[in-house]
Amino acid sequence: MAAEKKGILNRLYIVFIFLTLFFIAIVVKIVYIQYSERGDHYRKISEERTIKNDTIQANRGSVYADDGSLLATSMSRYEIRMDACTVKADIFEEKVKALSVELAKMFGGSPSAHVMRLRTARKNKNRYLFIARNLGYLDYQKVKAFPIFNLGVYGGGFIAEQSTRRERPLGKIAERTIGYDDYRGEPGIEGAYKGYLRGKLGWRLKQRIARGHWKPISDNNELEPQDGRDIITTLNVNIQDIAHNALLGQLKKFKAEHGSVVVMETKTGEIKAISNLARTSDGGYFEKRNYAVYEKQELGSTFKLMSMVVALEDKVIDTGTVVDTQDGVFKIYGRSVRDSHEGGYGEISVARVFELSSNVGLVKLVYEGYKDQPEKFVNKLREFGLHEKLGVSIKGEGQPIIPHPNDKNWSGISLPWMAYGYGVELTPLQTLTFYNAIANNGVMVKPRFVKEIRFQNEAVKVFEKEVLNEKICSQETVGKMKELMKNVVRRGTAKNLYSPDFSMAGKTGTCQVDYGIRDTPIQYIASFVGYFPADDPIYSCMVVIHRPDKRLGYYGNIVAGPVFKEIAHKIYRDAPLLKEIKNKEPQSELVDDNFESYFMTSNEQLKKMPNLKGVSGMDAISILENLGLKVEFYGNGNVKKQSLKSGTKIIRGTVVKLNLS
């Protein structure tokens, strides 16, 4: 028995020694992990599994029109959740009903239903209870001040997740030009200036909680994000609206596949409007691609301006030179060049060739003048820079094609075909830039989409006018081409567009596509490009409409020209150019007396505060300062609220506060 007890004790001693050694080993391992380099490694692993740095996106800068109207901006949005376990029991019981009342007022439902939901969450130890999402900043502040929530993350279990959403007040208008900075390829202004718009990221610490959710450790961010810079574009909201709707109406009328329109300020190259619309399967239209910037195409008759400038500069022709268009058909190398007018125009001057857009006349002139040295004709086109991209800021500009006699595919018909716009390819914006140079007395300016970059109302970078070519041709040639383009509208192919009320100048274009393809019906591209007013150009404009329904019409003057005319007319109507109006009325004492009475009445009105709601901020500030008032404004865009009511008597030096939306 004694031996048996001794054996049991020995075994117990062995077990005890083993357990003691095992315990010592654990202690040693803990000490080693805690104080050795491996300790830092394991602590890092632990923290990575329970704590992380969460990126906070910076607010992107806003994109503005030339008058301060918003084109694109980032709006903060908040998702609210609750850690129902964090709140102390006595505080929860005391204030849960008050919190439920506020939640019911803001989000609907009954207070009792909210009480039950909150109690259930606490009972189930829900640490990530959903409250609301997609809240604006003001609503977020209201919720943050609710009972319990006003105690913060630890005291009230309040969890707020911030995100941003891009808003575009104009909707789909100019969508591809304003652009995006995402998976859609970073097109437009947003893509081109993403480095300025994005700002700098911030971050905050988050802790892992139940069910794989993460919640912020504190109310404060570890690193605050820095907002992006604002972009002030050249786009004009009013002109953009006019251009968009004029193009849309014509596309629908002719059931066209797609089209584009660009309006440019002649002297500066500022793009005031650009619209690109394509037909959907259901017959609607939307901004699919920026056709004006990227889509190169054969020009047809709008290229005749370039051919004429080359020939006039080289003294190969003059506007009075006579050419025989015969019966409207000219055969060369087994191919036929035809005029749209059946039977031809007979013997006509070069001026009439351009005004009537005679293919035969221009091809004969260019071929006779350059058949022995076609490179002279082509090199002159390249001197204009027509073979190079403009280098606009928006990505995706098409590469122009100007064939050269050294090219492998150059043939005997290349030169005559080039003369009237076949075999050459330019984008609408590149074509417009050349026409704009004629309107600008030979100075070719680079198209510009952005005026400046601003941060907190201070200019960071200003984009000035950039001249691509100081003088594309002589002033004599410029003057002749201006006169010919006026006559195109007065008595040429675009005489249907003529109006005695406002002057325009330009050139029609009708180009075949899908020609030479067996069993494929020929389609057309209709275009019109020019400028207005004709004598003192302020704006140039190009309209291109692809594949209209041929049964309804396909000529440039019928399909594209009316869009140009509508844009010009509405700009005249909204901002009349007084220098264009001639005073034909006789002087009258009665008229003078009535004017004096009107002036006195108007002068009295200037002593009262005007109603500025809806007026752009820049205009409102100018008006008030001219009235002798001091202005303080908040925000951007149009006037939403004014501190001095309309009709109030004005006292010079008074401070007026404007809230802009």
Image: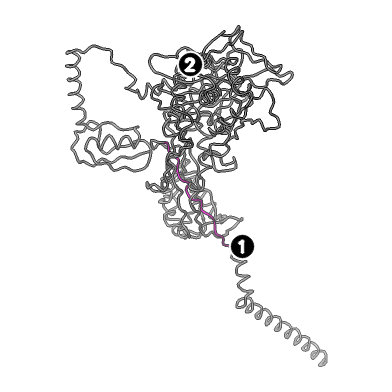
- Which one is in front, 572 or 169? 572
Q: Position of residue 402 (x, y in %)?
A: 61, 31
Three-letter residue code for mark 2: Val
Range covered by the magenta-colored residues = 49-65
Q: Is residue 578 left or right of residue 3?
A: left
To which residue does mark 1 refer? 49
- Which one is in front, 113 or 381? 381
Q: Give the answer, above or below, for where 201 lies relative to 659.
A: below
Mark closer to the chain start, 1 or 2: 1
Three-letter residue code for mark 1: Arg
Q: Position of residue 541 (x, y in %)?
A: 47, 26
Q: Is residue 394 visible?
A: yes
To which residue does mark 2 refer? 488
Tag in front: 1 or 2: 2
Secondary structure type for disc 1: helix
The quadrant holding residue 647 is top left
Residue furthest out toward the bottom: 2
Q: Quadrant of the N terminus?
A: bottom right
Label 2 Cα crowd, 10 Å radius (few <14 / some 14-19 / many 20+): many
Q: Give the answer, above or below, for where 185 lies relative to 227.
A: above
Q: Is residue 420 visible?
A: no
Q: Position of residue 515 (x, y in %)?
A: 68, 20
Q: Position of residue 65 (x, y in %)?
A: 42, 36
Q: Is residue 465 magenta?
A: no
Q: Give the answer, above or below, for where 187 lies relative to 29.
A: above
